[in-house]
Image (cartoon, rainbow, N blue to C red):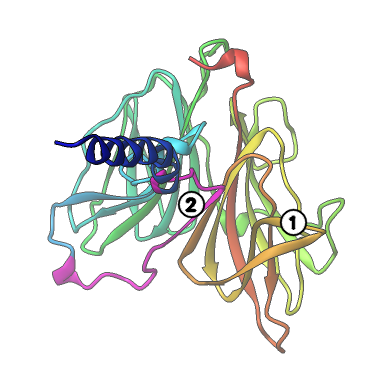
Amino acid sequence: MNRSCVKTKLKNLLLLLLLAPGLLAQDRKVDPTWLRRSIPFASKAEGDLPPGTCSYKAIFGEGDSDGRILRTVTRFGELAVGANGNCRAELYERQEEIYFVLEGNAVLHYADQAYAMRTNDFTYLAPGIRHSIVNSSQQALRVLVMSFKIPPRISIVATPTPKIVNLNDVKEETVEGHPTSVLYRLLLGSRTATRDAIDQAYVVTSLFWIDFAPGSTNFPHHHETAEEIYLVMDGQGEMVAGSGLDGVEGRYPAKTGDAYYFRPNCTVGFYNQNKPGAKAHILAVRARIPVPDEDD
């Protein structure tokens, strides 16, 4: 091999080495600031949900391809239970859970007690308590399951029996800092709070229902130390997710069944359609993230 050929090969090798980091960087996936998923809200036909079965569909967190980016939320998904079906008992030493019945009638087994639940019922499940859900009816049961990790430095105390509340029994009210055209039902909050229907949580700061009048918005905003999820229960409009360049937020179409996850400090909000009679409802949950020295 002549000297000229060797020099050419060396130059090509050097060029490849110089370009390689750039090529690798272009292939590297960046963790998203927000996530969008969708779940069907239409009732399942009896043939689609075999009797006696229990299945979980992940929306965010465990079981989702981007679950690694969530800090406090461990699971957010739908539990579907066929007629006369039951789910295995679960116990999480350092996780708290919220159940919201989307459709059907259930029996919640909590420790050694049983509690009836129906459509639009919600409850808080404390860490360290074995629990399970049973469908003793002939109709399908769908439950929204939300689970959250409790940092080691938070002390866990004994929790009383679960409190079960129905969405329709919680009054609508305005919230300071938001327009009066948007009404809230404050469903669940922190143990130190007193405004919610259930105040027993360690890391969940708020579970709330938002009622949007036609053309209304809850004003785009962000939370520096919390992650949040919006689930569109009915209606459609534009979801605000991220951006904020020069005060202009990012807007994306949102319809019934769409779910959005927002990382801390991500701009979040919703604009309802500006049409007569265009109502929209969102179920939202917010949980604080551990400060840096609380990470495992």
Q: Secondary structure at mark 2?
A: strand
Residue type at mark 2 is: Asp
Does residue 293 sit above or below 256 in this rendering?
above
- Residue under the point 49% across and 59% down: 259
Label whose residue precedes the other's in the sequence (2 or 1): 2
Q: Nearer the viewer, residue 269 or 123?
A: 269
Residue 295: x and y, percent? Answer: 53, 17
Q: Quadrant of residue 290?
A: top right
Q: Quadrant of residue 289?
A: top right
Outermost residue to the bottom: 276
- Residue under the point 65% across and 53% down: 170
Side of 258 relative to 175 (left or right)? left
Residue 205: x and y, percent? Answer: 65, 35
Does residue 103 sit above or below 54 in this rendering?
below
Contact? badges 2 and 1 (CB < 8 Å): no
Q: Nearer the viewer, residue 131 or 243?
A: 243
In the image, which disc is placed on residue 140? none
Disc 2 to disc 1, C-alpha distance: 36 Å
Q: Nearer the viewer, residue 72 or 263?
A: 263
Q: Which residues are magenta?
A: 27-48
- Residue under the point 61% across and 13% down: 293
Q: Is residue 126 magenta?
A: no
Q: Residue under circle 2?
A: 121
Q: Quadrant of residue 227?
A: top right
* Quarter of the figure with the N terminus: top left
User: Quick one: label 1, few (<14), some, or many (20+) residues within 10 Å?
Assistant: some
Q: Residue under circle 1?
A: 244
Q: Secondary structure at mark 1?
A: strand
Residue 258: x and y, percent? Answer: 48, 65
